Image (cartoon, helix red, strand yellow):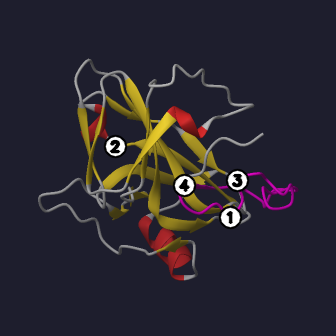
């Protein structure tokens, strides 16, 4: 496996792998986003589901209840101390059959105790990426919509996979918006 460079990521994005695609990394007064040397920094959309315990719910991935969070559609949200939010990327991804993508958190947020879950985008998966954001601090934390939230690294396999996410009819295929856990 090899990590794809900016030139190859750009070529694939022009073919529809990332929409909308930001050609160069932007960062004047904001958390950076766009094409980097060996990756792509995606933006968080202004759609957030912030976990709350108002109803004393238990989180169950097999029977997830929407009453476990509050919705916020705004440019800046506050994640309470030691809490968690779901969001999504602005960008819609279409992953080629011979590529695996790894999502990593941005160091600007990590240095503030805000962690983005590491997750793969499998070959031939497509959709908005649901981002899991944890505030590990004892203080409220701000998240800025329309700015960078995570970086994607693109790894090309030595050959295309035998069975892709699309072939398996994966449960998160084609997701739009913030997607809750599915069984």
State the CA–CA distance, disc 1 to disc 2.
Answer: 25 Å
Which picture quadrant has residue 66? top right
Q: Which residue is painted at 59% across and 63% down in the image?
A: 176
In the displayed structure, would residue 78 be above or below residue 45? above
Residue 112 in the magenta stretch? The answer is no
Instruction: Identify residue for label 1.
Output: 174
* Helix, strand or loop under label 3: loop
Q: Is residue 159 on the magenta stretch?
A: yes
Rendered residue at 44%/75% (across/down): 20
- Quickly name the residue at label 4: 129
Comparing 67 with 100, the one in front is 67
* Residue bearing mark 2: 106
Q: Position of residue 165 (x, y in %)?
A: 78, 55
Which circle's residue, 3 or 2, is located before the other in the chain?
2
Q: Main secondary structure of the magenta part?
A: loop
Q: Which mark is residue 172?
A: 3
């Amino acid at each position: 496996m090899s990590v794809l460079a900016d030139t190859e990521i750009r070529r694939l994005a022009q073919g529809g792998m990332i929409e909308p695609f930001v050609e160069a990394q932007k960062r004047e007064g904001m958390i950076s986003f766009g094409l980097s040397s060996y990756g792509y920094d995606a933006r968080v959309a202004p759609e957030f589901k912030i976990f709350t315990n108002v109803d004393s719910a238990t989180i169950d991935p097999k029977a997830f209840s929407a009453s476990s969070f509050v919705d916020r559609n705004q440019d800046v949200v506050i994640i309470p101390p030691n809490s968690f939010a779901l969001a999504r990327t602005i960008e819609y991804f279409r992953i080629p059959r011979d590529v695996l993508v790894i999502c990593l958190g941005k160091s600007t947020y990590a240095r503030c105790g805000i962690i983005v879950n590491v997750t793969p985008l499998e070959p031939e998966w497509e959709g908005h990426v649901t981002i899991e954001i944890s505030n590990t601090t004892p203080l409220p934390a701000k998240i800025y919509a329309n700015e960078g939230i995570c970086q994607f690294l693109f790894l090309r396999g030595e050959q295309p996979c035998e069975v892709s996410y699309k072939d398996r009819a994966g449960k998160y295929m084609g997701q739009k918006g913030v997607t809750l856990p599915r069984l």
